[in-house]
Image: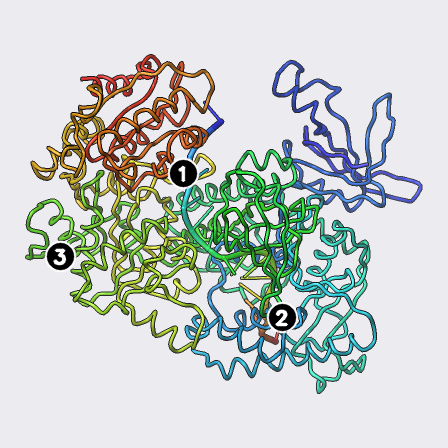
Amino acid sequence: MHVRGTVAGEVEVRSVSTSYGESELAEVPLRPADDASTARGDGGTVAVADGRETTTVTLWNKWTESAALLEPGMELLVTNAKEEEYRGETQYATTGESYVVVEPSFLVSVTSIRNWVECPRLYYLNKLSGVPLNYPVVKGTLVHEVFGDLLRGRDLEESIEARVEERGLQLGLLGETPEAVTEEIRENATAIEGWLEQGRLTEDDSWRSEQLLISETFGIRGRADAVRRGAPVELKTGKNLKKEPRFKDKVQAACYALLLEEHGGDVDIGTLLYTKNSALDRNEETGDLTPAKEFTMGEGLLKYVVRLRNEIAATEMAGDIPTGYEADAKCEYCFEQDTCMVVSGRLDQESKAGQIGQSLPDEELEYFDRFYRAIEEERREVHREYAKLWEQTAAERADDDRALIDLEFVEKRPLEGGRWELHARRTGGATSKLREGDLVLASDGHPVRGESELAMIERLDDEVVLTADEPVEVTRLDVYPSELTTDRLLVAMHDALLKGDERRKDILFGRADPEFEEIDETFIDNNDRQNEAVTKAVGARDCALIHGPPGTGKTYTIARAIRAMVERGERVLLSAFTNRAVDNALEALLEQLDGVVDTDRVVRVGSESGIRDDMEPYRLERAGDPEDRVAELQNAQVVAATTSTCGSRVMKEQSFDAALVDEAAQLTEPGTCAAINLAERFVLVGDHEQLPPVVRAENDLTESLFERLVDCHPEAGVMLDRQYRMNQRIQVFASNEFYDGRLRPATPAVAARDLDDLEGVSRDALPESLRDPVSFVDVDGDPSRYTDSDEAARIAELIESYEAAGLDRTDIGVIAPFRAQVSEISNHVPDDVAVDTVDRFQGSSQEVIVVSFTATGSLEGPIFEDYRRINVALTRPKRALVLVGDSTALASDPVYERMLEWASA
DNA sequence: CCTCTGCTGAGAGGA
């Protein structure tokens, strides 16, 4: 039986004498995890400390190593345990068949285990500083891709040509030619092909390539290069003339064996394929001509791998930093020795390799610590998402919008290159977070336990079209939780602190004040603050901060500033958190650059699905001739990309004179660093009175660098104060409440904006209660929590009134706080009315906005407590704003009460 | 209690 629970106290390891001799054991007090105990904990009716709640699990011998990692509160799983009666109590103990898994829901990747077994410090450094673009790695990846193609039956030459072409940009940045790369890949691939051919002649092989595997029991995930007759085959690009595979390679294969075991296999053979071994390299001991080395994986190795995995999970849960002493690796043979010593020295960390260099100042060490912890907390949240793949039922996943269940499989079509196109039909109208271009887990029923594969969503309407390596008969799609963003945040912070220049850090840490060059030029002649903002941005030696409240033309200001920089011959990076914001800013910039710079010197970097269709002509194609690809990027005077893409290997090779970051108040500090790390100077543009960064955990990431710097260096900031969007009556509340009354209409025409200005619209045709630019409609609250159907019905009537007065439905937007209410309203109103959450409305505007407050009783709840959300909602309309809600509930909060007074005036 | 965008990935190798 399996025992699972939470460690309920301190664990001690001791020795005992048994009939087999001296043995080690650890007695772990465990509070079993079962549904009953969870329910009781919630209700609080049964004391948690109740003795009967806790049992004891005895871990024997080698498993005591894992026991020593345990802290109270950690999760523990013991498989195949035996039940024992001791003094009238039921206890458990490991058996010869047992595995002990620490924090099983923390999925450790196979690569992590492989790095860790070499040296835990190597694992840490890899996580902290990432792997830069280098040729051996790109070549390795290419050989793997070709291997996969061969297994899927693709022609060798065709595969090599296509794969090299796909990586044109990377190869170009590395200065490689297609011919030289092709030649090298061919050498490795020939070894593979020969070996495959041998197999085909002698036995009936069954193959599967590139399989993504997740084990909920062992807490491991990874992607096997290939599986042959149920056993893992691991491909290596290097040479190995020894008799045995390298130990870390064995460990890697053993990880896949564990993963395969959970998926119904029973494997004890692993194959390592060293593809640089050629026929000429006859092994002296064995006489081998083949690149393949088979080895037997004993139970001991598999258990050892799980113990390694436990060390990683425990370290991550505790937030510890490895020192290298955990391993008996020899530092002098390590490729990363120098890096390791520098990082240890700069961050003042204990390390087996020793430290070199001067430690960072205390405030930087403290900063590193704080943000390292915050980012790792985010990472653990991503891991919680993985765990939900098996902890939640399909229906729960669907309710959380994280899965589409009930798909009907239609067909699979083979694609060129051995991949597959999968078609399925949606049988319900369920919503989900999934979008076209997303990478998902496509399964025939369960994302972990069933047949499952990583797939790309090509189309998502009534029919779902996916592409994948294997032909899964897909009936369900799950969001695939990715650590990529977290990885990049950590690397960005590392680069800012350890690679950033000293002057930059003086500014970031408030040790020096930003300086500005005198500029005697007028850029914008009808708006002083905009002109000042451009002047500051252009003249900044370090940084400038532009605070742009709603409708104040910050996008235009950015575009004008970039044009001025480009005219001075500078190379500029344009960035923002979302693809939408990047494309908006780029659109405005292209207008400014018309006639100033060739459009082929403006490049948009990002994925095809992320970039808006009309910006596609500017998108940097990754595939093609290396020289061409790299020229397009290097010659670009303006490069536009999301901050996340700025952290990619390709972008990290680029450098700029200036970085302009739009919507900077929505970015975490490390997120902002990913962009500004690439430039000499930076300009942040945003509004910290609107929505803050989206983070999973509450921590230091919730305050943006923009907001912190506005406080720290007010002299570097400019606030745009004239808005071009709202009728004056609409603007008043936001101006007073959020901008100290400093926001005002840019022109009398803006101030007087009215529905009557629109063609065919007559304000007098509206019911009297809606004739004012701001109106309030009182609705008795519906007691349900996140929806209000009365309110939705009332909103539908309001829309009819506006339509009757001549307004086009596409000029109306409806904003609600909850997604549930958004879909409730969508069911009541015609399709061409835009209905969305506040968060998604940020950055856009409409002629008429209707806000559904969906609040009853009290306004408790984070959604209402963050007033920045109301600021966004109330500042979207140009000519008319209608607030719909329960006045009693709204009046219970002073800010909302003031809002009511204003709306009803 | 809620809001929710990014990312192809995970692993590529060198004594």
Q: Nearer the viewer, residue A237 or A490?
A: A237
- Tell me which amino acid carries mark 3: Glu
Provide residue A27's location: percent of width, then percent of height: 77, 33
Circles 3 and 1: CB distance less than 8 Å? no
User: Number of callouts in the render?
Assistant: 3
The x, y position of residue A48, in whole percent, is: 66, 20
Tell me whether marks 2 and 3 sit on the same chain.
Answer: yes
Residue at which label 3 appears: A517
- Picture coordinates of residue A143, whole percent (x, y): 60, 73
Q: Which mark is residue A149?
A: 2
Q: Residue at x 71, y 52 (%)?
A: A259
Residue A310 visible in the picture: no
**Does A161 sit above or below residue A214?**
below
Q: Please tell me which residue lies in front, B4 or A133.
A: B4
Q: Which class describes the residues within 10 Å of circle 3: few (<14), some (14-19), or many (20+)?
A: few
For label 1, the SS is: helix
Compared with residue A464, is residue A285 higher up or lower down, i.e. above or below? below
Q: Quadrant of residue A849?
A: top left
Front position among marks 1 and 2? 2
Give the image quarter of residue A313: top right
Spot occupied by residue A756 in the image (x, y as percentages of width and height): 14, 33
- Position of A410 relative to A141 (above/below): above
Mark 2 or mark 3: whose residue is earlier in sequence: 2
Can you say which quadrant of the picture contains the N terminus of chain A? top right
- Nearer-N-terminus badge (1/2): 2
Q: Please, which chain is the residue tagged with disc 2 on?
A: A
Which mark's residue is nearer the viewer, 2 or 3?
Answer: 2
> Which tag, 3 or 1, sits closer to the chain's start?
3
Q: CA distance from mark 1 to mark 2?
A: 45 Å
Distance Cα–Cα, label 3 vs label 1: 33 Å
User: Hey, which residue is sitting farthest bottom in the picture?
Assistant: A280
| Circle 3 SS class | loop
